[in-house]
Amino acid sequence: MLISEAAQYIKSTVPTRAVAALYGYTPNAHGFMVCPFHAGDREPSLKLYDSADQKGWYCFGCHAGGSVIDFVMRHDSCSFAMAVRAIDHHLNLHLLIVEDFQTQEQFHQRQIHIDEEAASRLKDLDDQKKAIEKERDQNFDSLLFLEHIPVSLRTARDWDQTLILRDALDYNEYQLSIIEEKRKKVQSWRISQRLRRDP
Ligand SMILES: [Zn+2]
């Protein structure tokens, strides 16, 4: 079970008293206990709710309140996930088995790895793209220069060079289109990998 699913289950089924009892608190006959969240609470002002339609707690002194998970988070100064794990563990609910947690962690690590891999491939492609664009711009400048020579003054070598440069420019455009294709492939690879759930 995922943390979010376990949290939903805990909030709706685990008695608030059971969680308070983990910390050694017992409510009085009216369901009140001394509030651990504000100082000097001589008259118990924290009420525990355990009815079918209402679960949780509220302190009429310091106005703290919430679900059983909020109680643990506040009491232990811990994260939401840690509180869910603590309740699951201490009340032997077995909602989160260790393997599940490891699988989630592995899944998370794999997502990070996929993003890094994609970013690195995209960077390589960007570097290649910049190099080709630079070469294309140089080829274009050279061609422009040759085409500014009056026709009557052009040598055979100038004509050859013009043809070579035109071919080179076509080839540069082709290279750039290949890189664009590769970029798209990396993007779709990243998405498909991220959506995979199996390891
Ligand atoms: Zn309080």
Image: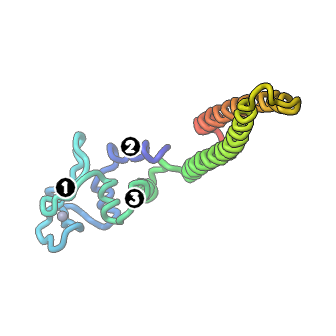
Of 54 and 180, nearer the camera is 180
Q: CA distance from mark 3 to mark 1?
A: 20 Å
Seen as rendered, the residue at the extreme front is 152
The number of numbered badges drawn on the structure is: 3
Q: Which mark is residue 58?
A: 1
Seen as rendered, the residue at the extreme top is 151
Seen as rendered, the residue at the extreme right is 156
Which three-letter amino acid code belongs to the residue tagged 2? Answer: Tyr
Q: CA distance from mark 2 to mark 3?
A: 18 Å
- Which of discs 2 and 3 lies nearer the camera? The answer is 3
Q: CA distance from mark 2 to mark 1?
A: 20 Å
Residue annotated with mark 3: 79
Horizontal side of residue 127 vs 66, given as left or right: right
Q: What SS does tag 3 mark?
A: loop
Q: What SS does tag 1 mark?
A: strand
Considering only order in the chain, which callout, 1 or 3, is on the residue closer to the N terminus?
A: 1
* Residue at 25% over, 51% down: 56
Q: What SS does tag 2 mark?
A: helix
Circles 3 and 1, Cβ within 8 Å, touching? The answer is: no
Residue annotated with mark 2: 9
- Which of discs 3 and 1 lies nearer the camera? The answer is 3
* Residue at 38% over, 62% down: 78
